[in-house]
Image: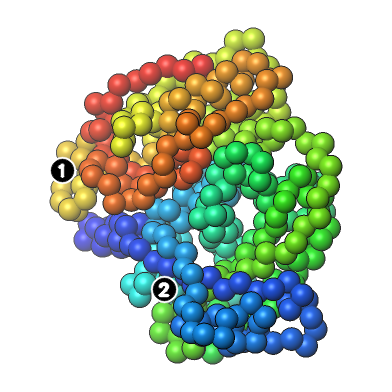
Amino acid sequence: MILQLMETQRRIFRAFTAQASLPLYELERTHVQKKHSRIRPFLRQRGFTKDPLCPQANVKPDELNFDGWRLAHAVKKAECLRQMPFEFIQRLGFILEHLPTLDWRRGNLRLQPGVARAYADFAGSSLAGRIGQGIALLFMEAREYAFAAHYPRAAGTPGPDFIFEKIDREDRALVEAKGAFVAPDVQPNIKSTLADGLHQLSLADPLGSKKSYVVGSFLRENGDQAEELSLVAFVDPDLFSSSDESPRDLVVRHNYAAWLDAMHLHYAASDLRTRTHRDHPEPVRLHVVNLNGTAFGVVPIDAFLPYWFDESFQLWPSTNGRLVVAGLPMRILARIGSALASPSSALTIDEVSLISPFGPYLESPFKGSVLRDGSLLGSLPARVLVEAPLEEIRL
């Protein structure tokens, strides 16, 4: 039993620290919407041979690079943006259960053999969609969009998934995310999937957005002999401008409210979204950890490795285990506290307030991910949290 548990933890740990990539193929909107146009083949050394955007020379497509922590971070942020029920947000089911269904050994991100057919039902499409949303968030992160909000619409009505915003807050974009698991010897209908996303965008109020994207991720199994790799196909259609009557800090507020939910600070998250004023903000005590010169307020949200194992999977006292932590820079938390104290004031997070995003290969003790908005997800040894100072902040 102990040996099985140790092997499971080894597999999870490898998944979190492994690197992977997906080639990025761009299609032209009119070509996707044209009934009898062809988009294949997707060649490894250049883009589409049948698409107007494809250069005639052999030009390798751009790639989206990430690791397990970064993908887990993006998926969790996307779920929190959608305002899932508290008990769902509190669980790390995706991180601990589903991340190992991905095969990270080939460079090109793959599914473990048999996963596509095993998940060929509603649950599978839901999981593929969740991973697709995380990949879309990383796609936008690579394009320097720091803040994100779930697109505001009534339940059951059509529209895109997200609205993104850059740090200067002058550049917004709507995004519809698609995701699919592709079984061996199956050719997914990428064109139809992207066309459906374009239809979703066409029904949406731009809310001041200057750009829009449909981002589809199509993941194949390891061992699939198809010429196509696991890939991301996207469309960047034109979007007509419109008057924007939404609050100027709508995206920023929802972005940080989502991560307050991830940190289990649900009342503060709700108040930040709804601009609710509280006469007596609650004192919150956070562990303060200094990483790369930035003080982060973090909270443990789950156990990554059992308390009695350390990274080498040896038996140790409990403080050598690793905990999953979520956090934000203390200076950003202070600005959020000020916005909660004065709901009529705009929440502004300027470029100076944001740290540079960094990946997982940091010096001990932190292993994890930090996105452009400063949100942090990763693991720390339990002993680091025990020794970290506690600081009180009112939210």
List x then y, in percent, for residue 228. Answer: 51, 84
As drawn, the label of residue 316 is 1
Task: Out of 192 and 323, give the one closest to the viewer.
Answer: 192
Locate the N terminus and report the quarter of the image it occupies.
bottom left
Amino acid carrying mark 2 in the image: Asn
Q: CA distance from mark 1 to mark 2?
A: 36 Å
* Residue 229 visible in image: no
Amino acid type, label 1: Trp
Name the residue nearer the viewer: 278 or 345.
345
- For marks 1 and 2 on the same chain, the one whose residue lies earlier in the sequence: 2
Tell me which corner region of the image, top left, top right, bottom left or bottom right, holds residue 6.
bottom left
Q: Secondary structure at mark 1?
A: loop
Question: In this figure, what is the number of numbered marks?
Answer: 2
| Helix, strand or loop under label 2 | loop
**Residue closer to the observer: 237 or 369:** 237
Tell me where residue 44 appears, x and y as whole percent.
47, 83
Q: Is residue 65 left or right of residue 83?
A: left
| Residue 386 in the image, given as x and y percentages of width and height | 26, 28
What residue lies at 55% left-to-right and 20% top-to-bottom? 337
Instruction: Identify residue for label 2.
Output: 108
Relative to 168, say whether 359 is above or below: below
User: Colour scheme in the image?
Assistant: rainbow
Work out whether 299 lies above or below 197: above
Q: Residues within 10 Å of mark 2 (few under 14, many from 20)?
A: many
Query: Within 10 Å of the Cα at label 1, are there few (<14), some (14-19), or many (20+) other Cα atoms?
Result: few
Residue 367 visible in rendering: yes
**Which residue is found at the position 64% from the left and 39% from the top?**
169
The reply to whether discs 1 and 2 touch (Cβ–Cβ < 8 Å) is no
In the drawing, does residue 359 fall left or right of residue 176? left
Residue for point 69% across, 35% down: 250
Which of label 1 and label 2 is nearer to you? 2
